[in-house]
């Protein structure tokens, strides 16, 4: 393992049976305690004074660790603001017999410096030593914006969710009530549970919450819940030794192979306890997968909301899921592995057909879920392991064949799509296949992006009614990466255009999102931007205002 950076704090722990769950895996609650302690020490190393946890969010669990292995937690300040800091946390597990290391988890936490007396705090800036430090420094600002606007974004999405019929709410065989998943527990805060400031250790509270959430999830699936991610641990206020902490957990909603459990914590001192008047000090939303005894992934039953509170929690889970999807970009820790193929004229037919088939297969997959519906435009998402795909469906009052002509000519795309600055044909392969060079605008202060893509166009067969425009990045030696641009990649994208009648059609745009293009989708998926809806509306307007004569002259 490499030497630690000057500002980095590391904790290494050998996993003992006392740290494990009944399956012999490191307890997620124990890991959360270690994470919080390491992050606090990193914050205090930078600030030079005592710090407290404000929130821990965007925790992603990639691997499990087992008894006998060694956990190493790395934490460092990515950016300091006036009185608060963002801490980046990375957890690695090493097998001592093989020496193999794997990424277990990544997380981001926010710590606030505690002033001494009436002294005002203004934290020093973080020293940026590497290119990665600069990247994380810029992303920290984006993540902070997401956190600060989280409540407003959530309220807007909840309002939006109430304005269209949620297909998941339709009656369906096998749906279950979440009443049986409700769990309550109480803990008396003792001196071993306190941190070095005398308050209840935040990591201990998180561990108690995770334990209760696991019980709640297991009551629904009757299997082994595995914590996949934590939406947010938000610390609303402190508690101290002698307080009684009351925990309440319940399943909010399920999404095929994952379930969201909400946990609420209230604190009572002796006087508050006798009066039954507690303080709401913490809330969290934890997302679980589950496996059966054969280690097979379990599909959760659909949830049937009954009471008004059930519907509030049900729709809240949908809104939070959408925010999580958008946050994937600003919390990304994975490097993109290029998957685009080398363009080979001798293999043109095979590459073209594969391009079209990939788009059709993406569209045919099950599991698409609606995340937004406004007038003529619907947005769907599909999650598959680490892959996220988007579908934008729009109704257009123009014939399918004219719509196909307009959308399959990518030189026209900058006229309606603000994500495309320029788009030129660099290789007219055939009537059905062209290779384009595309430039995109700057996002988040980074360099602009560029793309080299193969566009494969197909008219419907005699008995069919669907036009296809498939897009995929290719490697072209004559167009190498330019230092002024970041070469990006489209894995699989395109349009499927289906005729409704002789004068209207449905246009479905699909995109399997790669890390390099996710900045253009993040805000929309997360609910703090309407750029996709705005682009779709611009596309509709462009198509419906086009003249037949102009189309005939162009083609």
Image (cartoon, rainbow, N blue to C red):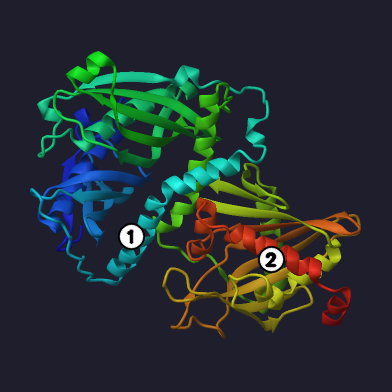
Report which quarter residue 341 is drawn in: bottom right
Q: Give the mark count.
A: 2
In front of the other: 252 or 472: 252
Vertical side of 239 occupied by 508: above or below: below
Query: Which numbered tag is attached to residue 538?
Result: 2
Does dot 1 land on a helix, a strand or a loop? Answer: helix
Q: Residue at (55%, 83%) from the top-left corner?
A: 479
Question: Of discs 2 and 1, which sits in the foreground?
Answer: 2
Mark 2 near mark 1, Cβ–Cβ under 8 Å? no
Mark 1 nearby-residue class (10 Å; few <14, some 14–19, many ≥20): many
Give the residue number, with chain letter if any, for mark 1: 140
Outermost residue to the top = 274
Q: Residue at (18%, 60%) from the top-left corner?
A: 123
Vertical side of 177 occupied by 149: above or below: below
Outermost residue to the front = 118
Q: Quadrant of the C terminus?
A: bottom right
Does dot 2 land on a helix, a strand or a loop? Answer: helix
Mark 2 nearby-residue class (10 Å; few <14, some 14–19, many ≥20): some
């Amino acid at each position: 393992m490499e030497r630690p950076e000057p500002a980095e704090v590391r904790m290494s722990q050998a996993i003992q049976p006392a740290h494990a769950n009944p399956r012999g895996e490191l307890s997620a609650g124990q890991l959360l305690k270690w994470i919080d302690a390491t992050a606090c020490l990193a914050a205090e190393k930078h600030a030079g004074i005592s710090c407290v946890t404000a929130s821990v969010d965007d925790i992603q669990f990639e691997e499990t660790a087992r008894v006998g292995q060694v956990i190493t937690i790395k934490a460092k300040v990515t950016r300091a603001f006036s009185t608060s800091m963002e801490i980046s946390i990375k957890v690695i597990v090493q097998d001592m017999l093989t020496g193999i290391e794997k990424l277990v988890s990544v997380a981001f936490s926010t710590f606030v410096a505690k002033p001494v007396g009436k002294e005002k705090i203004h934290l020093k800036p973080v020293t940026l030593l590497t290119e990665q430090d600069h990247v994380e420094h810029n992303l920290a600002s984006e993540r902070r914006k997401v956190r600060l606007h989280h409540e407003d974004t959530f309220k807007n999405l909840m309002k939006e969710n109430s304005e269209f019929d949620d297909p998941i709410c339709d009656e369906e065989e096998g749906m279950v009530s979440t009443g049986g998943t409700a769990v309550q527990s109480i803990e008396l805060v003792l001196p071993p549970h306190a941190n070095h400031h005398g308050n209840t250790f935040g990591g201990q509270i998180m561990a108690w919450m995770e334990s209760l959430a696991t019980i709640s999830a297991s009551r629904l699936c009757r299997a082994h819940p595995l914590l996949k991610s934590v939406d947010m641990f938000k610390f609303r206020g402190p508690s101290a030794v002698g307080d009684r902490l009351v925990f309440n957990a319940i399943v909010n909603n399920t999404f095929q192979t994952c379930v969201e459990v909400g946990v609420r914590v209230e604190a009572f001192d002796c006087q508050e306890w006798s009066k039954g008047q507690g303080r709401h000090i913490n809330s969290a939303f934890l997302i679980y997968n589950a496996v059966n005894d054969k280690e097979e992934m379990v599909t959760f039953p659909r949830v049937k909301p009954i009471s008004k509170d059930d519907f509030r929690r049900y729709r809240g889970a949908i809104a939070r899921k959408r925010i999580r999807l958008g946050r994937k970009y600003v919390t990304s820790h994975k490097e993109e592995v290029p998957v685009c193929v080398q363009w080979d004229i001798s293999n043109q037919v095979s590459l073209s057909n594969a391009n079209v088939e990939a788009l059709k297969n993406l569209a045919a997959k099950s599991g698409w879920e609606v995340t937004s519906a406004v007038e003529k435009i619907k947005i769907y998402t599909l999650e598959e392991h680490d892959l996220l795909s988007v579908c934008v469906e729009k109704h257009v009052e123009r014939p399918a064949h004219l719509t196909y002509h307009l959308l399959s000519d990518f030189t026209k795309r900058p006229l309606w799509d603000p994500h495309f600055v320029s788009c030129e044909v660099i290789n007219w392969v055939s009537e059905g296949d062209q290779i384009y060079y595309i430039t995109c605008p700057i996002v988040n202060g980074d360099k602009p992006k560029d793309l080299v893509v193969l566009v494969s166009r197909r008219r419907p067969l005699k008995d069919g009614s669907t036009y296809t425009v498939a897009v995929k990045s290719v490697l072209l030696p004559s167009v190498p990466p330019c230092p002024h641009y970041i070469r990006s990649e489209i894995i699989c994208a395109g349009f499927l255009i289906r005729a409704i009648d002789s004068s209207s059609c449905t246009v479905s745009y699909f995109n399997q999102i790669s890390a390099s293009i996710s900045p253009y989708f993040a805000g929309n998926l997360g609910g703090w931007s309407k750029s996709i809806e705005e682009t779709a509306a611009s596309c509709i307007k462009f198509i419906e205002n086009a003249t037949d004569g102009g189309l005939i002259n162009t083609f």
